[in-house]
Image: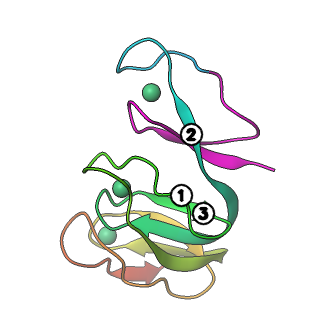
Amino acid sequence: MSSHYQCRKCYQIIPEDGRPNSGHCPEGSSHDWRELAEVGSTYYQCRKCFEIIDADGRPNSGYCPEGSSHDWRELAEVGSTNYQCRKCHQTIQADGRPNSGYCPEGSSHDWREL
Ligand SMILES: [Zn+2]
Ligand SMILES: [Zn+2]
Ligand SMILES: [Zn+2]
């Protein structure tokens, strides 16, 4: 079972099957990985830093680069239809039109089916 891990120091998020290697953290010495969520069938987006991950239930609050912890909101069920935001060009594969969410280009995403 894969999980999303986040480094407490550089905020990088990666999916990994088991705890990732500590490797080299750009913030100094090695990454300090913490588990955010198991990879799952629902997309969640952080309202503050706009990060999107596919998780099995609401992710842990983790460490938000915009301050304190992430503020996760449900975006869509994972599916097989490509939706792209006209404004920020982010693409996700969803099962039906995603929620408007929070667009880094301002207010909410403007999803179109590809
Ligand atoms: Zn790091
Ligand atoms: Zn965040
Ligand atoms: Zn957008």
Please state if 24 lies on the left or on the right of 63 as rendered.
right
Residue at (48% x, 77% y) in the render: 75
Write down the region rendered in magenta.
Answer: 1-21
Relative depth, front residue between 47 and 101: 47
Query: Callout 3: helix, strand or loop?
Result: strand
Question: Is 16 placed above or below 45 here?
Answer: above
Write down the quadrant of residue 104 in the picture: bottom left
**Residue 86: percent from the left, percent from the top?**
31, 73
Q: Amino acid at mark 2?
A: Arg
Relative depth, front residue between 33 and 93: 33
Q: Residues within 10 Å of mark 1 (few under 14, many from 20)?
A: some
Magenta stretch holds residue 32: no
Relative depth, front residue between 25 and 61: 61
* Disc 2: which residue: 34
Please state if 48 lies on the left or on the right of 29 as rendered.
left
Name the mark nearer the viewer: 2 or 3. Answer: 2
Q: Residues within 10 Å of mark 3 (few under 14, many from 20)?
A: many
Q: Earlier in the sequence, mark 3 or mark 1?
A: 3
Residue at (53% x, 57% y) in the render: 60
Q: Is mark 2 within 8 Å of ligand 1?
A: no
Marks 2 & 3, CB-CB < 8 Å contact: no
* Disc 1: which residue: 60
Q: Amino acid at mark 1?
A: Asn
Q: Earlier in the sequence, mark 2 or mark 3?
A: 2
What number is the disc on residue 54? 3
Question: Is 80 placed above or below 19 here?
Answer: below
Q: Earlier in the sequence, mark 2 or mark 1?
A: 2
Q: CA distance from mark 3 to mark 1?
A: 13 Å
Name the residue at the bottom extreme.
Answer: 96
Marks 2 & 1, CB-CB < 8 Å contact: yes
**Residue 47: percent from the left, percent from the top?**
32, 68
Q: Amino acid at mark 3?
A: Asp
